[in-house]
Amino acid sequence: MKNIVITGSTRGLGFAMATEFLRAGCNVTLSCRGEMLAEAAQMELSPFEGKYIYVPCNVQGKASL
C-alpha cells in the first residue's frame, strides 16, 4: 500500500490528485493552512474515511530558532 503526502491538497489540483490517489487505494495525507479540513472537502472524501488524514501546516511565518 502506498502512502502519499500532498501539500495544498484541500482544493484545486491538489484536491483532485488526492482524490485520485484515494481511488487508486493509496493512503493520503492532506495538508493546508486551515486548522481543520473544510466541511465540503470532508463530505466529498467521506467514501474514503479511514484512508486519509488531515495535517494543518502553515509556513507563512518564519519562526525564530
Image: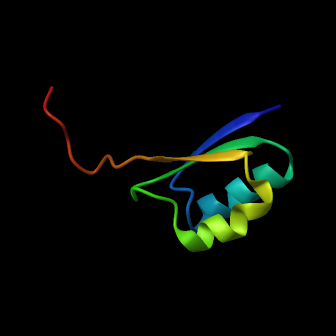
Residue plotted at (46% across, 58% down): 36
Residue plotted at (70% across, 69% down): 44
Answer left or right for 1 relative to 11. Answer: right
- 48 relative to 40, above or below: above
Give how far across and how far down residue 35 sits, in percent.
39, 56
Residue plotted at (67% across, 47% down): 52
Q: How many marks?
A: 0
**Where on the picture, by quarter, is residue 23?**
bottom right
Residue positioned most to the right? 24
Residue positioned most to the bottom? 40
Residue plotted at (83% across, 31% down): 1
Give how far across and how far down residue 27 sits, in percent.
73, 40
**Where on the picture, by quarter, is residue 45?**
bottom right
Of residues 13 and 38, the one nearer the viewer is: 38
Give how far across and how far down residue 60 sits, in percent.
27, 51
Answer left or right for 27 relative to 65. Answer: right
- 40 relative to 3, above or below: below
Q: How is the image coloured?
A: rainbow
Give how far across and how far down residue 17 sits, in percent.
70, 56
The image quadrant where one finds the C terminus is top left
Residue positioned most to the top? 65
